[in-house]
Image (spheres, rainbow, N blue to C red):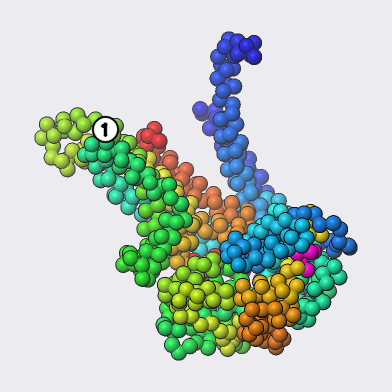
Amino acid sequence: MTALSAFFYRKPRLRLGFLLSAPLLWLGLAYLGALAALFVTAFWHTDAFTGQVVVEWSLDNFKTLFSDAVYRTITFRTVGIAALVTVIDAVIAFPMAYAMAKLASPRAQRILVIAVMTPLWASYLVKAYAWRSMLSGNGALSWLSPGYGVTATIITLSYLWLPYMILPIYAGLDRLPDSLVDASGDLGARSLRTFRSVILPLTFPAIVAGSIFTFSLSLGDYIAVKIVGGTSQMLGNVVYDNIGAANNLPFAATVATVPVVIMLVYLAAVRRTGALDNL
Amino acid sequence: MKNRKTRLAGLLGASLLLAACGTSGSNSAAPPGAQGFTPPKLEALKALGQPEGQLNVLAWPGYAENGANDPKVNWVTPFEQQTGCKVNVKPFGTSDEAVTLMKTGQYDVVSASGDASLRLVASGDAEPVNTALVPNYADVQPFLKDKSWNSVGGVSYGIPHGWGANLLTWRTDKVTPAPTSWSVMFDANSPYKGKVIAYDSPIYIADAALYLMAHQPDLGIKNPYALDDKQFTAAVNLLKQQRPLVSEYWSDYLKESQALKNADAVVGTAWQVTVNLTKGEGAPLEASVPSEGATGWSDTWMVAAKSQHKTCAYKWLDYIVSPKVNAQVAEYFGEAPANPKACAEMTDKTLCDTYHANDAGYASKIAYWTTPIQQCLDGRTDVKCKDYGEWTKAWTEIKG
């Protein structure tokens, strides 16, 4: 044992490699490996009747995905819902996070952070079903949404992902030195100008960081829309139905690459804002 | 960095190249057989052995109650005491889920509806059943035995268990006069627009086909599960026309019950168990089989080919259609029992009449769920029918 530790002590690089091997193995095999397996499956197909996967390389699934109008509609609907949820959350979260970071006393700050996190402790399903009954014909909030559908889905998802937006913005605002805001005021800027020229640019990366959560979580969701979405479906439902109903794992994998690609494009776009350094 | 990027690009390129090897025209016809396909060669059990002590049951909710939902409803525990087979129950929500779960090989028996059973037979997940080892099979209604959904080429693949119709249900306070036709759910001018709740499964296309059988006879639909190109398109178009009327599709019967209770939906397709449950919670609900007839289910208990507990599985098959237990299940779930002797064992003696349990004529009016396959189930050989894979694709399209 001592010989071993002495050996690693003398070879710091080897020691580092040894320590990093477990997390790297996890990332490489379990995480990226699973993604790669998914990508490969997308090129296979299933026997329509027995449902067994047939290992035969073809681009049929991608052809269907691009040629059938219904998948385009669903993709646009999903991206639209995810974008709207992100905007709604950002608009609600910013003032809340600002009040928490800049106006509340340190004691109140801690209580508020806990209060924001409490909904995360309750089960997703309970919250979604609660919204279902609130938005139903004789529910308390039925005026918010004309029955179940896209509106109801956006409301429910906005509620579900709000904490994931508040917390990064709060962290960003917390890091913003008060002295900068004071300096802006001293230089004669009114509050709106200070907000536009000082606060917003400095916290923008934090907002983008929050948007990555809300956007990607909405993009992959299928449960909320199943509960409050009425007849409408999102990409997640197509994936789910193709596994659950059709037992067509290859096509489900094909559809699942769509959100992956959208997220990669989105991440590439926000990389320049420096938001990724904020995660 | 640059180097790594090129290598990654090369890897992606290589996989694309591999993938580009060709698009397959994979519509290979299934080999002919009594029903258009030949099931894998599997042998039924020859004789019972010693019970293995374990049994993993895959069942519709309400089919294998062990007192967990309601302490008064329990027929699993007596079975465990009689046979020493410890039962693990896994409920499933849709036939499609059951088929997927059976592929794991973790279950010994399954209560399969007709839209699942043939798929299980074809994939080799379920094996033939030696009915001689199931004494209670002798009592089962003859009109349920050796049907196209529970046997292939005269070989039995399971024990019929219970049957019923997918009913038309409506809120008596909101829907007047009482509907006698599915047109309240399909007619574009239905006064209940936005208040219709429909079943969420590709098999629901058959409900549209059944409606077309009565309303567009020139399409020549003989069997709602055997649809050629033209008939299939007509059914799919009818469902697309229905979509604006629909408030939501249900696959979870509790979700449907809630929608009917809140009057978010006032008319829809439902099972008797859902109607009973919702009425029990105070909703004014009625249900019937309308003039066009109805689709329905005829369930079969099947044995998994990979089962490690076959003796326990056969004991279960026999137990579940024994008069007393068959009565308990039928009464709890709301369906007609397969064993007519069950009628005498029911707490409510009128139930067998309510569900038309002994009425072969009524049973023949129901279009039982059957897996659609390429070879037309109605016997036509001049056309190809749409298989379940295509039904599933169309279902995504209908929901839009």
> Quick check: B59 left or right of A67?
right
Can you give x and y, in whole percent of width and height, for residue A239 in the image? 55, 56
Outermost residue, right direction? B46
Where B25 sits versus B378, above or below? Answer: above
Quarter of the image for residue A240 reads: bottom right
> For the image shown, how many numbered marks are present on the structure?
1
Q: In the displayed structure, does residue A34 sit left or right of residue B196?
A: right
Numbered disc 1: what chain? A
**Image location of residue A96, percent across then percent down:** 27, 45
Q: Name above or below for residue A49 compared with residue B143.
A: above
The amino acid type, in three-letter code, at marker 1 is Leu
Magenta stretch, main secondary structure, is helix
Question: Residue B30's spot in the image, x, y percent?
Answer: 77, 66
Q: Residue at x 43, y 80 (%)?
A: B192
- The answer to whether any part of residue A212 appears in the image is yes
Question: Which residue occupies 80% across, 54% down?
Answer: B52
The stretch of residues the image draws in magenta is: B314-318
Residue sitting nearer the eye, A209 or A97: A97
Taking the spot 54% from the left edge, 49% from the top edge, the residue there is: A257
Instruction: Judge the density around disc 1: few (<14), some (14-19), many (≥20) Cα neighbours within 10 Å.
Output: some
Front in this rendered view, residue B243 or B253: B253
Corner quadrant of residue B335: bottom right
Circle 1 — which element?
A: loop
Q: Is residue B63 above or below residue A203?
A: below
State yes or no: residue A115 in magenta. no
Residue B78 percent location from the top left of the image: 71, 64
Residue identifier under label 1: A176
Is any atom of residue B38 visible in this view?
A: no
Of B319 and B334, nearer the camera is B319
